Amino acid sequence: MTIELASALRIRLVEQLEAKLKDATVYADYAISLWSIRGISEIKSLPDKGSLADQLNRYIGDRPLATFVEGELDANFSGPGINYEAKEKPLTSYHGYDNIKSVAEGLVESLVSLPWSYQVTVKLPDPLGLRVLQEFGAFELSPRHRIVSGAMLEEEFPQAHRDLGLAARMMGSKYAPPWDENSAYLQVAMSGYFGAAQSEPFLAARDDVLTFYGLGLAFGLFVQVPASRLARLNESPFYVHRLTDEGWCQRATVDMPDQYEAGISTLAMHPGAAEDPAVLREKLSRISSIFRSNEGRSLALSARWLFESHCGRDALLQYIQAAVAIEVLLGDEEADPSVGLTTLMANRCAYLIAGTQAARSNLLKLFRDIYKVRSKIVHRGKSRLSSEEMNLFGALQYLLQMVIDKEQRLLERGEEKV
């Protein structure tokens, strides 16, 4: 559904953009200075409430006009070539930008043509990717998510390369290699606008990648092993392609944040999934059920937090991330305040997982011990976790995996009955 702007609003936006872009300058004959167009953020003509505001936020983000204009200027401006000796010059002094009103009109016309279609692609760890390719060739997780080979991508997408910016060029960065035809990639379709890594559609696609790894942990596709036992993954950025009249064109290359790269490097395929194609298919099918289900959003969110709790080196932060993940599934904002959130969640967890009264009693005690540590971190500002508290952290992650596992099975059974 394209964006509809009243004619008066379009005219006002063009006038305001024209006024702000007159101050735009270009650095080193190469890049438009973001500092010189900071005034675009001051334009408040677009509504901040209502259906149009919701649509703009979904397609772009919480500062839609500035994000879109900055992104399009950066993507489309092309100077004569990098000249580090050149002084900053007005944007209007460059070919195609001497008529700023025409530039502003073009930007508004492009804005109302949203949403645009994109694919975000990231390489999967070789043990998993190679196994999927060997057994299935490709695997559709949902209409928006699929696992494909580099060879398949070469047929439809331009060869992936790192889109070097000015800073990267100055530091001597090199282009990344093209698709690896013998490796598998997770591809996520997104709709809206991508101009930078902070646009809402890209963040949602990135979250889906993290959710994939979290669900893999919960369902036993992956196990975590000490990082020292594994070779660190090769750099695995997000490749972003946009669908145009000429086909899929590479829009950008976005680095995978270090903490996620490190977290992925600690994951190994569970032996059962690695050795038995039926088990591998079952694990992928369970992940697929969450991506396909309208009722699986809480499970997807919880799984993402689960994976994030396996990333990084800040145990206190990771503990809170795991606690948030379990609260997503077991918490209730409208619960009776006389019961207490911890007691409510402990009981829900116990009755979901434990099969006997004795097991429930033990789990209730464990859950309360876990949440005592959470309370100390949040309310007292602990500086580190003791050995015993680290054991409780491990127990929290294990309980979380079991809760996600059980909830997915209940969701799947419920949908089968409909």
Image: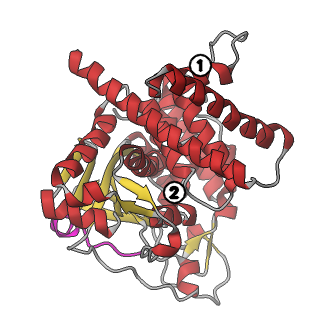
Instruction: Mark 2 vs mark 1: give the one in front.
Output: 1
Question: Mark 1 highlights which residue?
Answer: 332
User: Which portion, as a residue range, is magenta?
Assistant: 150-162
Q: Which residue does the image show at 36% across and 44% down from the upper left?
A: 219
Vertical comparison of 388 with 297: above or below:
below
User: Which x, y percent locates residue 30?
Assistant: 54, 77
Which numbered disc, 2 or 1, marks the residue that appears first in the sequence?
Answer: 2
Q: Amino acid at mark 2?
A: Ala
Magenta span includes 158: yes
Is residue 128 rendered to the left or right of residue 306? left
Identify the residue under disc 2.
197
Q: From the viewer's perspective, tell me whether residue 20 is left or right of residue 8.
A: right
The reply to whether residue 97 is visible in this rendering is: no
* Residue 400 pos. (x, y %): 51, 38
Identify whether 319 is placed above or below 313.
above
Task: Measure how far apart labels 2 and 1 are at the Cα level.
Answer: 32 Å
Q: Position of residue 276 (x, y in %)?
A: 19, 55
> Which residue is at 22% across, 63% downward?
131
Q: Position of residue 89 (x, y in %)?
A: 64, 75
Secondary structure of residue under mark 2: loop
150 and 387: which is toward the camera: 387
User: Quick check: is 89 in the magenta stretch?
Assistant: no
Element type where label 1 sits in the image: loop
Q: Residue furthest right?
A: 380
Q: Residue 208, can we see it? A: yes
